[in-house]
Amino acid sequence: MMAGSDRQALRLTGICKSFGAARALDNLSFDVAEGRFFVLFGPSAVGKTTTLRTIAGLTRPDRGRIEIDGRDVTHEPIAGRGVSMVFQSFALYPHLTVYDNFAYPLREEKVARAEIDRRVKETAGMLKLSHRLDRKPNTLSGGEQQRVALGRSLIRHPRVLLLDEPLTNLDAKLRHDMRAELKRLHRQFGMTIIFATPDELEALSMGEEIAVMRDGAVIQRGTPDELYERPANTYVAGKIGSPHMNMVKAVVGGDAATFDTPLGLLTPPVRRQSASPGEAAVIGIRPSDIRLAATGETAIQSRVHLLEPLGDITIVSLEAGGELLRMVLPEATATSIKPGDLASIAIDPNKIHVFRAASGQAMT
């Protein structure tokens, strides 16, 4: 993946936006380096679309500052920002051909006819749509419509490209193909892309950097590996990683180093300096960090509930100490067990995550 540059293409500082009594953005701040593929990730109604619309100038913030290429554009009109946006609904002009959908934004900018023709044909060729230029959008497949919407934004050579859940309306294979296409275009153009999605797979597979949003704010940002290995709280831990992290209630032991859980005493490798004896905690364990115990190894006894074969791996649901856990096993290993079996399991202590029960924040 491209490393991007140190220059900031975009910076949002203290952005607030309310619609009536509903707070859509709450002191939202983040910056994006030039050339970066940056993902806004979170479920519906966390403020992703409002964030993109605010960057584009379609929505005016109540407070805060927006900078593009170091220039304050907070109150500037849409046309002068050098930003282009692709909507979830594609928003194509149904009465215009593909050619005219591509050409429309350039005609609005009074670009010369010959230059429009050159850029339309160049963009169509890049997106494998040269043979569709005379067609209307309603005669195209979903994937082709998505590429037309993308091409209409790319043809303007924007400094920042905003993509609002652009793959949601496509079937699984088309989503996979378009993920690859977007990554190829990003490498080819080196443009700054802000991609909003509620889909964890899209976020982790496409984002060079991911900002996890909740209630109109970014609560953690980092590379996919950083978010997976060091989630800041139980919210991020539950959103990043599939299957999602197992969460087990715990109490900090008297030595402030061990944790009393329904699975027995667990001792993370790093002592939590801020842990208080008797404090309520939550232990997080990735399904991939649970395995079948080796003979003679200290183990936790469990009973198998359900097997979910997924090709080369199998998700195994089991009950241990009154807790329901999930672990991931290689398909070949999982063939030896079935629902109802007793299973001795082991947890990698080096991979245990510890959170405060009261706030959900990671214990450091």
Image (cartoon, rainbow, N blue to C red):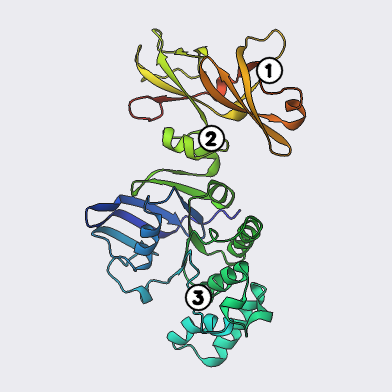
Q: Amino acid at mark 3?
A: Leu
Element type where label 3 sits in the image:
loop
Res 341 label: 1
Disc with the residue nearer the chain's start (1 vs 3):
3
Three-letter amino acid code of the residue under disc 2: His
**Residue 154 image position (x, y, % from top left):** 53, 72
Q: SS of the residue at dot 2?
A: loop
Residue at image point 65% right, 73% down: 126
The reply to whether the C-beta atoms of the residues labelled 2 and 3 are less than 8 Å apart is no
Report x, y in % for residue 66. Answer: 32, 61
Which numbered disc, 1 or 2, marks the residue closer to the eye?
1
**Residue 92 image label:** 3
From the image, tell me which residue sits under label 2.
Answer: 244
Q: Alpha carbon of mark 2 to alpha carbon of mark 3: how far? A: 37 Å
Q: Residue at x 63, y 28 (%)?
A: 306
Residue at position x 40%, y 59% in the image: 49
Quadrant (top left/top right/bottom left/bottom right) for the C terminus: top left
Q: Nearer the viewer, residue 272 or 126?
A: 126
Q: Is residue 310 above or below residue 88?
A: above
Q: Amino acid at mark 1?
A: Asp
